[in-house]
Amino acid sequence: MKLLIEDEKGLLDAKTVALLRRCADAAAQTEGLRVPVAAFVSIVDDARIREVNREQRGIDRATDVLSFPAANYPKGRTAQDCEALLRRQYDPDADACMLGDILLSIDHVRAQAREYGHSERREAGYLLTHGLFHLMGYDHMNEEEKTRMREMEERSLVSIGLAREGGEPMTDRELMEMAIAAREFAYAPYSGYRVGAALESEDGLVFTGCNIENAAYGNTICAERTALGKAVSEGARRFTRLAIASSGSAPYPCGACRQSLYEFAPKLRILVTWDGRAEEALLCDLLPEGFGPMSLGKDNAQRGAKK
Protein backbone atom coordinates (compact mmCIF):
# COMPACT_ATOMS: atom_id res chain seq x y z
CA MET A 1 0.00 0.00 0.00
CA LYS A 2 1.21 3.50 -0.78
CA LEU A 3 1.04 6.00 2.05
CA LEU A 4 0.99 9.64 1.02
CA ILE A 5 2.06 11.30 4.26
CA GLU A 6 1.65 15.02 4.89
CA ASP A 7 3.72 16.09 7.87
CA GLU A 8 4.36 19.78 7.33
CA LYS A 9 5.72 20.37 10.86
CA GLY A 10 8.07 17.38 10.77
CA LEU A 11 6.39 15.68 13.73
CA LEU A 12 7.41 12.14 12.72
CA ASP A 13 10.93 10.73 12.65
CA ALA A 14 12.18 8.40 9.92
CA LYS A 15 11.66 5.26 12.02
CA THR A 16 8.04 6.13 12.67
CA VAL A 17 7.41 6.78 8.98
CA ALA A 18 8.99 3.40 8.15
CA LEU A 19 6.76 1.67 10.72
CA LEU A 20 3.64 3.36 9.36
CA ARG A 21 4.48 2.07 5.89
CA ARG A 22 4.92 -1.45 7.28
CA CYS A 23 1.56 -1.18 9.04
CA ALA A 24 -0.06 -0.10 5.79
CA ASP A 25 1.40 -3.03 3.86
CA ALA A 26 0.34 -5.44 6.61
CA ALA A 27 -3.22 -4.07 6.61
CA ALA A 28 -3.56 -4.46 2.84
CA GLN A 29 -2.16 -8.00 3.00
CA THR A 30 -4.42 -8.95 5.90
CA GLU A 31 -7.44 -7.66 3.98
CA GLY A 32 -6.34 -9.66 0.96
CA LEU A 33 -6.41 -6.80 -1.53
CA ARG A 34 -5.49 -7.72 -5.10
CA VAL A 35 -5.26 -4.21 -6.54
CA PRO A 36 -2.69 -1.51 -5.73
CA VAL A 37 -4.11 0.91 -3.17
CA ALA A 38 -3.07 4.14 -1.51
CA ALA A 39 -4.15 6.31 1.41
CA PHE A 40 -3.49 9.93 2.29
CA VAL A 41 -2.36 10.49 5.89
CA SER A 42 -2.12 13.93 7.46
CA ILE A 43 -0.24 14.36 10.76
CA VAL A 44 -1.93 17.10 12.78
CA ASP A 45 -2.28 18.43 16.32
CA ASP A 46 -5.35 18.27 18.56
CA ALA A 47 -6.51 21.72 17.51
CA ARG A 48 -6.67 20.77 13.85
CA ILE A 49 -8.30 17.38 14.35
CA ARG A 50 -10.88 18.99 16.64
CA GLU A 51 -11.68 21.52 13.93
CA VAL A 52 -12.17 18.80 11.31
CA ASN A 53 -14.18 16.66 13.72
CA ARG A 54 -16.50 19.61 14.36
CA GLU A 55 -16.88 20.51 10.68
CA GLN A 56 -17.29 16.98 9.31
CA ARG A 57 -19.01 15.12 12.15
CA GLY A 58 -20.55 17.80 14.34
CA ILE A 59 -18.45 16.66 17.32
CA ASP A 60 -16.63 19.52 19.00
CA ARG A 61 -13.68 17.69 20.55
CA ALA A 62 -10.28 16.34 19.60
CA THR A 63 -9.82 12.64 18.92
CA ASP A 64 -6.91 10.38 18.07
CA VAL A 65 -7.68 9.44 14.46
CA LEU A 66 -10.28 10.32 11.83
CA SER A 67 -10.91 8.31 8.67
CA PHE A 68 -12.76 9.37 5.53
CA PRO A 69 -13.23 6.44 3.11
CA ALA A 70 -13.25 7.22 -0.60
CA ALA A 71 -15.64 4.37 -1.39
CA ASN A 72 -19.12 3.73 -0.02
CA TYR A 73 -19.07 -0.02 0.60
CA PRO A 74 -22.32 -2.02 0.55
CA LYS A 75 -23.53 -3.06 3.99
CA GLY A 76 -21.64 -6.04 5.33
CA ARG A 77 -18.91 -5.87 2.67
CA THR A 78 -15.35 -4.56 2.84
CA ALA A 79 -12.62 -3.65 0.38
CA GLN A 80 -11.63 -7.26 -0.35
CA ASP A 81 -15.17 -7.90 -1.64
CA CYS A 82 -15.37 -4.79 -3.80
CA GLU A 83 -12.55 -4.80 -6.34
CA ALA A 84 -14.64 -3.11 -9.03
CA LEU A 85 -15.61 -0.38 -6.58
CA LEU A 86 -11.98 0.12 -5.61
CA ARG A 87 -10.89 0.38 -9.23
CA ARG A 88 -13.25 3.31 -9.68
CA GLN A 89 -11.13 5.17 -7.11
CA TYR A 90 -8.00 4.95 -9.26
CA ASP A 91 -5.75 8.00 -8.91
CA PRO A 92 -3.24 8.41 -11.77
CA ASP A 93 -0.94 10.58 -9.63
CA ALA A 94 -0.64 7.85 -7.02
CA ASP A 95 -0.90 5.08 -9.65
CA ALA A 96 -3.15 3.27 -7.19
CA CYS A 97 -6.76 3.09 -6.05
CA MET A 98 -7.35 5.62 -3.27
CA LEU A 99 -8.85 4.22 -0.10
CA GLY A 100 -9.38 7.66 1.43
CA ASP A 101 -7.95 10.13 3.94
CA ILE A 102 -6.74 9.77 7.53
CA LEU A 103 -5.97 12.46 10.08
CA LEU A 104 -3.70 11.36 12.92
CA SER A 105 -3.30 13.53 16.02
CA ILE A 106 0.28 13.62 17.26
CA ASP A 107 -0.93 15.02 20.59
CA HIS A 108 -3.12 11.98 21.15
CA VAL A 109 -0.32 9.66 19.99
CA ARG A 110 1.96 11.08 22.68
CA ALA A 111 -0.65 11.08 25.43
CA GLN A 112 -1.88 7.54 24.73
CA ALA A 113 1.66 6.21 24.45
CA ARG A 114 2.30 7.47 28.00
CA GLU A 115 -1.00 6.03 29.21
CA TYR A 116 -0.38 2.57 27.74
CA GLY A 117 3.32 2.50 28.61
CA HIS A 118 4.77 2.00 25.16
CA SER A 119 6.53 4.11 22.53
CA GLU A 120 4.94 6.87 20.49
CA ARG A 121 6.04 4.98 17.40
CA ARG A 122 4.02 1.92 18.36
CA GLU A 123 0.96 3.99 19.25
CA ALA A 124 1.12 5.72 15.87
CA GLY A 125 1.20 2.29 14.22
CA TYR A 126 -1.86 1.13 16.16
CA LEU A 127 -3.87 4.22 15.31
CA LEU A 128 -2.93 4.17 11.64
CA THR A 129 -3.95 0.50 11.41
CA HIS A 130 -7.30 1.32 13.00
CA GLY A 131 -7.81 4.16 10.53
CA LEU A 132 -6.89 2.03 7.53
CA PHE A 133 -9.43 -0.65 8.39
CA HIS A 134 -12.06 2.07 8.58
CA LEU A 135 -11.02 3.07 5.04
CA MET A 136 -11.48 -0.54 3.97
CA GLY A 137 -15.07 -0.67 5.18
CA TYR A 138 -14.84 -1.82 8.80
CA ASP A 139 -16.65 -0.12 11.68
CA HIS A 140 -17.52 -0.61 15.36
CA MET A 141 -21.08 0.66 15.67
CA ASN A 142 -22.19 -2.56 17.37
CA GLU A 143 -20.47 -5.46 19.15
CA GLU A 144 -20.46 -7.71 16.09
CA GLU A 145 -18.81 -5.05 13.93
CA LYS A 146 -16.40 -4.14 16.70
CA THR A 147 -15.30 -7.75 17.17
CA ARG A 148 -14.79 -8.26 13.45
CA MET A 149 -12.77 -5.05 13.06
CA ARG A 150 -10.66 -5.77 16.12
CA GLU A 151 -9.83 -9.27 14.87
CA MET A 152 -8.59 -7.86 11.57
CA GLU A 153 -6.54 -5.18 13.31
CA GLU A 154 -4.96 -7.77 15.61
CA ARG A 155 -4.11 -10.07 12.71
CA SER A 156 -2.48 -7.21 10.89
CA LEU A 157 -0.52 -5.96 13.90
CA VAL A 158 0.61 -9.43 14.95
CA SER A 159 1.93 -10.09 11.43
CA ILE A 160 4.63 -7.48 12.05
CA GLY A 161 5.11 -8.22 15.74
CA LEU A 162 3.19 -5.20 16.99
CA ALA A 163 1.39 -6.71 20.00
CA ARG A 164 -1.32 -4.58 21.62
CA GLU A 165 -0.60 -2.69 24.85
CA GLY A 166 -0.67 -4.74 28.01
CA GLY A 167 -0.39 -8.01 26.08
CA GLU A 168 2.12 -10.76 26.75
CA PRO A 169 5.35 -10.75 24.72
CA MET A 170 5.38 -12.96 21.65
CA THR A 171 6.27 -16.52 22.56
CA ASP A 172 9.09 -18.47 20.94
CA ARG A 173 6.47 -20.67 19.31
CA GLU A 174 4.70 -17.68 17.79
CA LEU A 175 7.97 -16.32 16.43
CA MET A 176 8.76 -19.69 14.88
CA GLU A 177 5.29 -19.77 13.33
CA MET A 178 6.05 -16.43 11.69
CA ALA A 179 9.24 -17.95 10.26
CA ILE A 180 7.25 -20.93 9.00
CA ALA A 181 4.81 -18.55 7.29
CA ALA A 182 7.69 -16.59 5.72
CA ARG A 183 9.07 -19.83 4.25
CA GLU A 184 6.06 -20.02 1.94
CA PHE A 185 7.51 -17.12 -0.07
CA ALA A 186 10.94 -18.73 -0.53
CA TYR A 187 12.40 -18.77 -4.03
CA ALA A 188 14.48 -21.93 -4.12
CA PRO A 189 14.24 -23.51 -7.60
CA TYR A 190 17.80 -24.87 -7.51
CA SER A 191 18.28 -26.38 -4.05
CA GLY A 192 14.64 -26.94 -3.21
CA TYR A 193 15.59 -26.02 0.37
CA ARG A 194 13.02 -23.43 1.43
CA VAL A 195 13.80 -21.32 4.47
CA GLY A 196 11.88 -18.64 6.37
CA ALA A 197 13.17 -16.32 9.08
CA ALA A 198 11.59 -13.96 11.63
CA LEU A 199 13.91 -11.46 13.33
CA GLU A 200 12.69 -9.65 16.45
CA SER A 201 14.04 -6.19 17.27
CA GLU A 202 14.59 -4.93 20.79
CA ASP A 203 11.30 -3.00 20.72
CA GLY A 204 9.29 -6.07 19.72
CA LEU A 205 8.88 -5.52 16.00
CA VAL A 206 9.35 -8.53 13.75
CA PHE A 207 10.93 -8.54 10.30
CA THR A 208 10.48 -11.63 8.16
CA GLY A 209 12.45 -12.94 5.20
CA CYS A 210 12.92 -15.95 2.98
CA ASN A 211 15.81 -17.34 0.96
CA ILE A 212 16.10 -16.00 -2.59
CA GLU A 213 18.20 -18.17 -4.89
CA ASN A 214 19.80 -17.07 -8.14
CA ALA A 215 21.01 -18.78 -11.30
CA ALA A 216 24.38 -17.25 -10.45
CA TYR A 217 24.58 -19.24 -7.24
CA GLY A 218 26.83 -16.77 -5.45
CA ASN A 219 24.07 -14.15 -5.61
CA THR A 220 21.73 -16.24 -3.46
CA ILE A 221 20.49 -14.49 -0.31
CA CYS A 222 19.66 -16.45 2.82
CA ALA A 223 16.42 -15.89 4.70
CA GLU A 224 18.28 -14.55 7.73
CA ARG A 225 20.04 -11.84 5.74
CA THR A 226 16.82 -10.94 3.92
CA ALA A 227 15.16 -10.31 7.29
CA LEU A 228 18.20 -8.46 8.62
CA GLY A 229 18.37 -6.22 5.55
CA LYS A 230 14.71 -5.29 5.92
CA ALA A 231 15.17 -4.53 9.60
CA VAL A 232 18.29 -2.40 9.28
CA SER A 233 16.88 -0.51 6.28
CA GLU A 234 13.95 0.54 8.50
CA GLY A 235 16.13 1.75 11.35
CA ALA A 236 16.36 -1.29 13.63
CA ARG A 237 19.79 -1.87 15.16
CA ARG A 238 19.28 -4.11 18.19
CA PHE A 239 17.78 -7.59 18.10
CA THR A 240 16.74 -10.20 20.65
CA ARG A 241 15.57 -13.34 18.83
CA LEU A 242 15.75 -14.93 15.39
CA ALA A 243 13.55 -17.86 14.38
CA ILE A 244 14.49 -19.90 11.31
CA ALA A 245 12.24 -22.54 9.74
CA SER A 246 12.76 -25.19 7.09
CA SER A 247 12.24 -28.92 6.58
CA GLY A 248 14.48 -31.96 6.24
CA SER A 249 17.25 -30.70 8.52
CA ALA A 250 17.96 -28.11 11.22
CA PRO A 251 18.29 -24.73 9.44
CA TYR A 252 21.08 -23.20 11.48
CA PRO A 253 22.46 -20.04 9.85
CA CYS A 254 25.41 -20.35 7.49
CA GLY A 255 28.75 -18.67 8.26
CA ALA A 256 27.95 -15.54 6.25
CA CYS A 257 24.66 -15.09 8.10
CA ARG A 258 26.31 -15.63 11.46
CA GLN A 259 28.85 -12.92 10.69
CA SER A 260 26.17 -10.50 9.40
CA LEU A 261 24.03 -11.01 12.50
CA TYR A 262 27.03 -10.77 14.84
CA GLU A 263 27.53 -7.18 13.68
CA PHE A 264 24.35 -6.20 15.53
CA ALA A 265 23.58 -8.84 18.16
CA PRO A 266 26.38 -11.15 19.35
CA LYS A 267 24.12 -12.65 22.03
CA LEU A 268 21.12 -13.13 19.73
CA ARG A 269 18.94 -16.12 20.58
CA ILE A 270 18.66 -18.42 17.57
CA LEU A 271 15.55 -20.62 17.37
CA VAL A 272 15.46 -23.23 14.62
CA THR A 273 12.50 -25.41 13.70
CA TRP A 274 12.05 -28.18 11.15
CA ASP A 275 9.64 -31.08 10.77
CA GLY A 276 7.97 -30.33 14.10
CA ARG A 277 11.29 -30.21 15.96
CA ALA A 278 13.01 -27.21 17.53
CA GLU A 279 16.41 -26.31 18.95
CA GLU A 280 17.97 -23.18 20.39
CA ALA A 281 21.43 -21.63 20.60
CA LEU A 282 23.11 -18.28 21.20
CA LEU A 283 24.78 -16.63 18.22
CA CYS A 284 27.99 -16.14 20.21
CA ASP A 285 28.15 -19.91 20.73
CA LEU A 286 27.63 -20.53 17.01
CA LEU A 287 30.36 -18.01 16.19
CA PRO A 288 32.92 -18.20 19.01
CA GLU A 289 35.53 -15.46 19.09
CA GLY A 290 33.42 -13.60 16.53
CA PHE A 291 34.67 -10.45 14.84
CA GLY A 292 32.41 -7.44 15.30
CA PRO A 293 32.41 -3.66 15.75
CA MET A 294 34.08 -3.92 19.16
CA SER A 295 37.01 -5.69 17.49
CA LEU A 296 37.64 -2.38 15.73
CA GLY A 297 37.05 -0.33 18.85
CA LYS A 298 33.67 0.77 17.52
CA ASP A 299 30.34 1.01 19.33
CA ASN A 300 27.67 -0.23 16.92
CA ALA A 301 24.81 1.23 18.95
CA GLN A 302 26.38 4.70 18.84
CA ARG A 303 27.19 4.46 15.14
CA GLY A 304 23.67 3.31 14.37
CA ALA A 305 22.15 6.17 16.34
CA LYS A 306 24.06 8.74 14.27
CA LYS A 307 22.72 7.48 10.96
Image: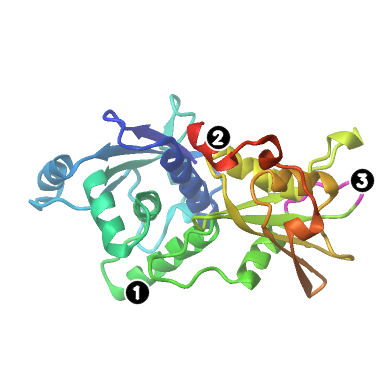
Residue 190 bears which disc, if any?
Answer: 3
Which residues lie in the magenta part?
185-191
Q: Secondary structure at mark 3?
A: loop
Residue 144 bears which disc, if any?
Answer: 1
Work out whether residue 31 or residue 249 is closer to the camera in this orientation and state it.
249
Residue 249 visible in the picture: yes
State left or right for residue 142 relative to residue 46: right
Quarter of the image where one finds residue 146: bottom left
Mark 1 and mark 2 in contact (Cβ < 8 Å)?
no
Residue with the mark numbered 2: 303
Residue drawn at (78%, 71%) of the image: 279
Q: Secondary structure at mark 2?
A: helix
Q: Amino acid at mark 3?
A: Tyr
Instruction: Give the Cα separation between the discs numbered 3 and 2.
Output: 38 Å
Residue drawn at (33%, 62%) of the image: 117
Up-down relation of residue 64 to residue 273 (above or below): above
Mark 1 and mark 3 in contact (Cβ < 8 Å)?
no
Up-down relation of residue 189 to residue 159 (above or below): above
